[in-house]
Image: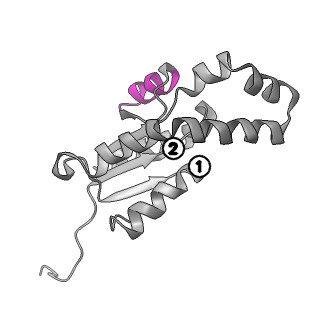
Amino acid sequence: TIDTNEEPKPRKVTIMTTGSRGDIQPFVAIGVALKKAGYDVRVMTAPSETHAMLLKDFGLEHVPLGIDVDRLMREDKEIGSAMETGDTLKFFKCIGKLVENHTADTVRPFYNEFLANEGEHRPDLLLVSYLNRYFGFYARHVLKIP
């Protein structure tokens, strides 16, 4: 017999993660496992070549989000200095400035993914990394996406 009270399983999953390759790699593994289990998986992460190639190599769809972290690490001397010296406070101050200056680069893709095009890409489930938790809260409480 079929239980008609059973909730349908989510089929479309979006993973939203930010950071360097080491930050997103665990989410790539989760995405691969979900894809093998039959889910449609999209990964929203930095528009860097490193991220794009990693996702392509594992057969995951890349949705560019935010800023190119690889380029930033190469070109921003202040962040480079903070990374080289291990100055965590300086590093997070730099990240704070970036968030201020590049919020639109992150918000636009989020809007396009979840609200535009009559919800064409709206996922049934959103997995977010710690650095993207605000979007997770918004998705859960405003958009009602678990």
The residue stretch that appears in magenta: 50-60
Specify the label residue 131 is tagged with. Answer: 1
Q: Is residue 100 left or right of residue 66?
A: right
Q: Quadrant of residue 101 in the image?
A: top right
Total marks shown come to: 2
The residue that mark 2 highlights is: 17
Rendered image quadrant of residue 57: top left
Estimate the spatial distance between the alpha carbons at disc 2 and disc 1, rounded to whole Å: 7 Å
Residue 112 pos. (x, y %): 29, 43
What's the residue at 45%, 22% (across, down)? Answer: 53
The structure's colour scheme is one colour
Label 1 crowd (10 A; few <14 / some 14-19 / many >=20): few
Question: In the picture provided, is 102 more to the left or to the right than 90?
Answer: left
Residue at (23% x, 47% y) in the render: 116
Kind of residue indicated by mark 1: Leu
Q: Is residue 40 something one can see in this rendering?
A: no
Residue 118 visible here: yes
**Mark 1 and mark 2 in contact (Cβ < 8 Å)?**
yes
| Rendered position, 2 above or below 9 | below
Asked if the magenta segment contains residue 102, the reply would be no
Q: In this view, does 1 lie to the left or right of 11?
A: left
Locate the C terminus and report the quarter of the image it occupies.
Answer: bottom left
Task: Name which residue lies at 18% across and 45% down.
Answer: 117
Judged by depth in the image, the label closer to the viewer, 2 or 1, is 1
Q: Residue at left 51%, top 43%?
A: 17
Seen from the viewer's position, the closer of residues 87 and 31 is 87
**Mark earlier in primary sequence (2, 1):** 2
Across and down, in percent, residue 92 comes to 74, 41
